[in-house]
Image (cartoon, rainbow, N blue to C red):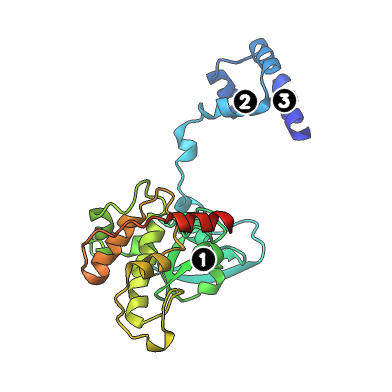
Amino acid sequence: MKEIEKWKEKIESDNLSEDEEKIFNQMGLNGESRRKFLKGVSIATISIWASTYFTSDLFANAIKDLPDKTLVLLNEIKVNLRVNDMVKPLTLDSRTTLLDALRERLVLTGTKKGCDHGQCGACTVMIDGKRKLSCLTLAATCEDKEITTIEGLAKDGKMHPMQQAFLKHDGFQCGYCTPGQICSSVALLEEAKNGEASYVTENFKSIKRNLKLSEEEIRERMSGNICRCGAYNNIVQAFKQVHSGDDEMPTWEFATSEQMEKAKNA
């Protein structure tokens, strides 16, 4: 509050910088008209209104244009991130997550920041072929590991088969969770080839390689990736096409009255 009052006093006394003066002039506020205006609005209102008068040049600098060396960096470390077949040397705070390093330092914004708590799966990438939540992974732990983001799936200008299947079967609506969904699906293909078990695997002793996953298995294994638009059936269909060549639309599952009653009383 003290800082706000100081700034308000600065405006009222016309003790403005050249840039600040220019902004208020563009707003049509100068001298007495500015002081009358200030009496009827809050500082927050001024800041919102004034933001529309900033030139686009002020917002044009991409992250990649910022200097590599940060003036003040706590717990500074150097790390080489191998991302999409390219090595990126970075100087980071040791507490920087892989998600923030990808988005803020490498401008790979396909990986989305959703909940930032490891619950929605929007930030899923692949590390050494395994799907990982980049918001819960420290960049410092990824030294020289193979990191693949959604930007690295297409090769020679051709989309990955999973990307093509998502488009064909409309496995998205808003598209926000789609990069994480696709990365998770691609990694799941390898899990099936390796014969890795899931929560719904019936017999752990008889697991074989090159599993053909059922709809129940697909839904369980993809359950960590939340789609708020509800395109789950289309996502399952896209995965099935790439995984087993099955192009049949998944079945809708509805809870019975007994299941709904049981859930209600649980």
- At label 2, the amino acid type is Thr
Say which quarter of the image contains residue 5.
Answer: top right
Question: Which comes before the other along the chain, label 3 or label 2?
Answer: 3
Q: Residue furthest bottom?
A: 205
Query: Quick one: label 2, few (<14), some, or many (20+) residues within 10 Å?
Result: few
From the viewer's perspective, is residue 187 above or below residue 105? below
Q: Earlier in the sequence, mark 1 or mark 2?
A: 2
Q: Secondary structure at mark 3?
A: helix
Q: Residue 90: which disc?
A: 1
Q: Nearer the viewer, residue 53 or 134?
A: 134
N-term mark: 3 or 1 = 3
Q: CA distance from mark 1 to mark 2?
A: 39 Å
Residue at the far right in the pictured view: 2
Residue annotated with mark 3? 8
What is the three-letter code of the residue carrying label 1?
Leu
Element class at badge 2: helix
Residue at 48% from the left image edge and 51% from the top image edge:
63
Q: Nearer the viewer, mark 3 or mark 2?
A: 2
Residue on which the image places disc 2: 45
Name the image quarter holding residue 208. Answer: bottom left
Residue 4 left/right relative to 241:
right
- From the top left corner, tell me how far across and down residue 24 is, in percent: 59, 21
Kindly check if marks 3 and 2 are in contact, taking CB atoms under 8 A apart as contact: no
Q: Which mark is residue 175?
A: none
User: Is residue 154 visible to us here?
Assistant: no
Q: Is the C-beta separation of discs 3 and 1 under 8 Å?
A: no
Residue drawn 49% across and 57% down?
120
Cα–Cα span, label 3 and label 1: 41 Å
In the picture, which quadrant includes the N terminus? top right
Q: Quadrant of residue 182?
A: bottom left
Mark 3 → mark 2, Cα distance in angstroms: 12 Å
